[in-house]
Image (cartoon, coloured by chain):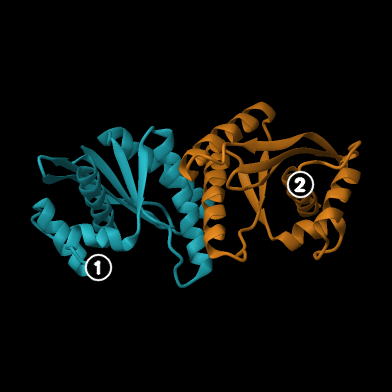
Chain colours: A orange, B cyan
Amino acid sequence: MRVLGIDPGTVSCGYGIVDYEKSRFRSVAFGLLECSPHVPLPQRLVTLFGSLENVIQEYRPQDAAIEEAFAGKSIQSSMRISEVRGMVIVCAGKAGLSLAQYPPATIKKAVVGVGSAHKSQVQHMVQILLGLPDLPRPEDASDALAVAICHCHRSHLGAL
Amino acid sequence: MRVLGIDPGTVSCGYGIVDYEKSRFRSVAFGLLECSPHVPLPQRLVTLFGSLENVIQEYRPQDAAIEEAFAGKSIQSSMRISEVRGMVIVCAGKAGLSLAQYPPATIKKAVVGVGSAHKSQVQHMVQILLGLPDLPRPEDASDALAVAICHCHRSHLGAL
């Protein structure tokens, strides 16, 4: 199976494409969808939507996965991130992808084995699981790979 | 000028199309974009996106307007509404519409003259300003007409 993980942000979104076959993970692509921080959020959303459409068209994943919404320290920034999530949800849905959502602790547990793992541990385990020569960077792309790995894992468990 | 006002909700979105010429408002269309409350929010967002695209295609507004995001009583429901707002922002942006955002008090002031006006007063004044035979219903559609009226008013003042 091929899974697209997305880590939404208001200026850039991490993405990661992971193949999972015979209990092995393979990194297909990862990186950042970026836009200028100097344009208003509505225009940024449209730009990010177009870039995400391109990634889906290029790599043709079967499923998409994203971290569940959670309330951050600032309600204003939580609402801004939710607007980006809305963009991601529509983009995945229009492309016919099912979109799974996982709580942060579930993702960490799937990748590191501990729900309270530190971000650097997640990044390290993403590197190990995908057999990457270096730490996956930037961190947003690593987080996107992590949610994709979590979904592969969960789907596999569900299929057993 | 022709303006599309949108009142986003997680099950249905009010919409209202208003023409403004020579200081007169005219209601072109208003109603609800609806979807089943029994399907998950991601699918609902995709359905609402398609319906909103159809409204834009049918009525060809020049601008769109929406209430600014504000933190409601529940952070969870504020985040859900923000996901819908993200869908609206992308839909308007992809159609080439500029999207104006106004605080609730600014909309009430533009329609009723008082920023603290009650919802029923807004509905009443929307009826009067648009010369409608009855109160515009449902309330979400009336709210969408109100934000469209606010935008016409503000754009006209800006142009003076």
**Could you tell me if the residues under marks 1 and 2 are in contact, i.e. CB atoms within 8 Å?**
no
Name the residue tied to disc 2.
Answer: A139
- Residue closer to the observer: B104 or B36: B104
Helix, strand, or loop for circle 1?
helix
Judging from the image, mark 2 belongs to the subunit labelled A
Against A133, residue B9 (above or below) is below
Which residue shows up at 27% across the image and 36% down it? B61
Judging from the image, mark 1 belongs to the subunit labelled B
Helix, strand, or loop for circle 2?
helix
Which residue shows up at 74% across the image and 46% down it? A148
For residue B113, what is the image quadrant? bottom left
Total numbered badges shown on the rendered structure: 2
- Residue closer to the observer: A124 or A111: A124
For residue A129, what is the image quadrant? top right
* Residue A21: x %, y % from top left: 84, 38
Crowdedness near tag 2: few (<14), some (14–19) or many (≥20) residues, C-alpha within 10 Å: some
